[in-house]
Image: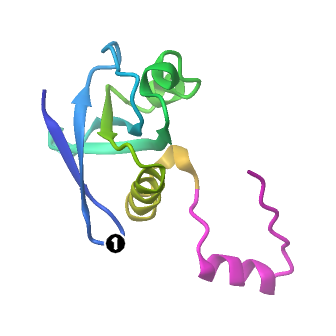
Amino acid sequence: MSEAIFRGFSGRLHRFKVHRPNAEFENAPGVYCFARPGPAGRGWTPLFISRTGNLEKRLAAHEQWPEAQLLGATHILIHESDERDAREYVESDLCQALKPVMNGPVLDAELTEAAAEAGVRLVWAA
């Protein structure tokens, strides 16, 4: 099994184990990433990053895996972390730095301010 290391927006390095999509995942919490091989076959390009409290259950039939495959995803990368706050931090840190195409735009203070000036009202839903 190989690993992938990504630098987050904070500058911290985050390690992921590389798995084939048909692997059996543990009933464990973690951050996962759908990825395709990087340019010239070197490294990995993250397409989607998220977190879960149960990797086995969440990845059994993930609704976004078919779309990721259409974008070239061949592997699922896993960063195991028991702490919920740590998983949220890793997901946010990497989404800000890597901007995975399937995660959409990351709203930051500058974007929010620009939207307010343009008269756009942002509504948040959880």
- From the viewer's perspective, is residue 96 above or below residue 62? below
**Residue type, label 1:** Ser
Residue occupying image coordinates x 79% and y 82%: 116
Percent position of residue 79, x then y: 31, 41
Residue occupying image coordinates x 47% and y 59%: 92
Picture quadrant of residue 98: bottom left
Picture quadrant of residue 6: bottom left
Percent position of residue 90, x then y: 39, 56
Percent position of residue 76, x then y: 34, 30
Horizontal relation, residue 43 to residue 62: left or right: left
Residue occupying image coordinates x 31% and y 35%: 77
Q: Which of 10/57 is in front?
A: 57
Q: Find out whether residue 66 is within the magenta segment.
A: no
Picture quadrant of residue 10: bottom left
- From the viewer's perspective, is residue 44 above or below residue 122? above
The total number of labels drawn is: 1
- Label 1: which residue? 10
**Magenta segment boundaries in residue numbering:** 105-126
